[in-house]
Image (cartoon, rainbow, N blue to C red):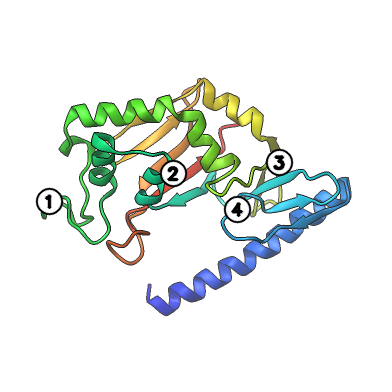
Amino acid sequence: MSTQAQITAGTEAKRIGHINEQLVCNWLNTINSGHIIDGKPKTKQDIINQKTGVSYSLKSVTKNHTQCHLTSTRRWCEFFQIDGELKTWFDLFFGIPGEDVSDGLSSQHRLIKSQIDDTLNGQSLDWFNQNKNQIFDVIVRRGMSDTPVDYLIWFDKPTGETQVYDVNDLEELVTTGRWIMNDTTLHFINANDDKMFHLQMKGSGARYNSSYHSLMFHIYKCF
């Protein structure tokens, strides 16, 4: 796809996204008035009820999963105050913008689990599981700008079906679940062994910049 085609597709996706937001907002107002589209950047809040202060994160989907968070490795490590050997693992597994940490082994300029020291892999997996609720807080509940939401709305674009979930109920699934590491990705599995989150290096778009090497989280409809 050419750059112009990518721009056109992105513009169209945003237009459709705004239409879907308005549809869901209108639906919420048939139940309880006062809802508006937030529309601010860098926030998890897509719809807010001006009367009650209740806020919603909207996921408009065509499949059983969708992106829920994207951030650079630098921003992630700064936010969680990650340094030392753990920071080394993030730099190897997700790559460093503008550098080839694989020394020519990978066209993505990153290393995969089997190419990284087992001790580093173990430390990183321990960190993900020790911080699973804090990670949930960032990727679902409040983001990195402290804009918390009370509910997640799952809007199925092909059918128009709309389901609303209490964020606290979703966090309970996280409390009893666990992160596991594969060769190129990490998955979060709930107590029923259903995949709830998927984490990968973005690996698309312009190569080797901070976006290309970002942490990209997807949320799966297992609830």
Can you identify the residue that label 3 sits on? 163
Question: Which residue is painted at 40% across and 50% down in the image?
Answer: 75
Q: Secondary structure at mark 3?
A: strand
Give above or below for 193 relative to 21: above
Give above or below for 167 relative to 162: above
Binning the other alpha carbons within 10 Å of mark 3 as few (below 14), some (14 to 19) or many (20 upward) gives few
Please tell me whether mark 1 or mark 4 is closer to you in this view. Answer: 4
Q: Amino acid at mark 1?
A: Leu
Q: Amino acid at mark 4?
A: Thr
Marks 1/4 in contact by CB < 8 Å: the verdict is no
Please tell me whether mark 2 or mark 4 is closer to you in this view. Answer: 2
Front residue of 213 and 153:
213
Can you identify the residue that label 1 sits on? 105
Q: Amino acid at mark 2?
A: Phe
State which quarter of the image contains the N terminus.
bottom left
Cα separation between marks 1 and 2:
30 Å
Earlier residue among tags 2 and 4: 4
| Left or right of residue 108: residue 19 | right
Front residue of 149 and 84:
84
Q: Secondary structure at mark 1?
A: loop
* Residue 69, horizontal then vertical, whole percent: 49, 48
Can you identify the residue that label 2 sits on? 79
Earlier residue among tags 2 and 3: 2
Can you identify the residue that label 4 sits on? 43
Earlier residue among tags 1 and 4: 4
